[in-house]
Image (tube, grey):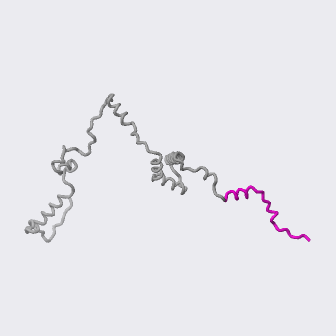
Amino acid sequence: MTRIKKARTPGRIGARKENRETAEQSRERKRKAKRKGLAPGSRHNVEGGKQSGHNQKSAQDPRLGSRKPVALVQEDNQQQVAVARARPVARPKLSPEQELEQLENDERLNTLLDRVEEGDKLSKEDKTWLDRTLARHQQLLEQLGLLDEEEEDDGEPGDDLWDRFMDAELDPAQYRKEEDKS
């Protein structure tokens, strides 16, 4: 061991006596330091114990899953129940007028039509749904007699003039001014 020199001034010989106030303060600090963090065992304590008695069932561990028994062998009754659940619920029949009104007020249809007009690309599901819906809309219009086929064929009245102009053989040379060669 290394040698330690003696100090010329002697330190305190005994422990210093604390007065009541400092002793009380130090005890308070120690108590607060001990109480940091959560209470011991809080992970295992179920919070259901804090609730009132009428809502409290049995103390259950919230980490555990369902306690519902699972059948290892499927019986005939369970197969019939599963088949019964799989059947789609039949919708009540709507009159063509009601169905047309419902289609025209459909938000999804309106948003998809707006996206198509803006030039956005639609997903495959959206395209098929939009095509089916528009086909049904067209079918309902024809069924109710609201679709006028004659108006679609006629077009605008100015189209006849345009068609005659396009069909005429135009020679631009005949309209040029020819200079006199004299």
> Which residue ends up furthest to the top in the rendered image?
76
Percent coordinates x, y for residue 130 in the rendering: 51, 48
Percent coordinates x, y for residue 10 in the rendering: 12, 69
Left or right: residue 68 compared with residue 171: left
In depth, the one of 112 and 142 nearer the eye is 142
Q: Quadrant of the N terminus?
A: bottom left
Is residue 84 something one can see in this rendering?
yes
- What's the magenta region? 158-182
Left or right: residue 83 compared with residue 147: left
> Which residue ends up furthest to the right in the rendered image?
182
Percent coordinates x, y for residue 73 in the rendering: 32, 29
In the picture shown, does residue 71 fall above or below 135? above
Left or right: residue 48 compared with residue 163: left
Q: Residue at image x 67%, y 57%?
A: 159
Q: Is 149 one of the magenta-colored residues?
A: no
Quarter where residue 61 is shown: top left
Quarter where residue 81 is shown: top left
Q: Is 161 one of the magenta-colored residues?
A: yes
> Which residue ends up furthest to the front in the rendered image?
145
Left or right: residue 82 compared with residue 137: left
Q: Residue at image x 83%, y 68%?
A: 177
Quarter where residue 30 is shown: bottom left
Is residue 124 something one can see in this rendering?
no
In depth, the one of 168 and 93 nearer the eye is 93
In depth, the one of 110 and 168 nearer the eye is 168
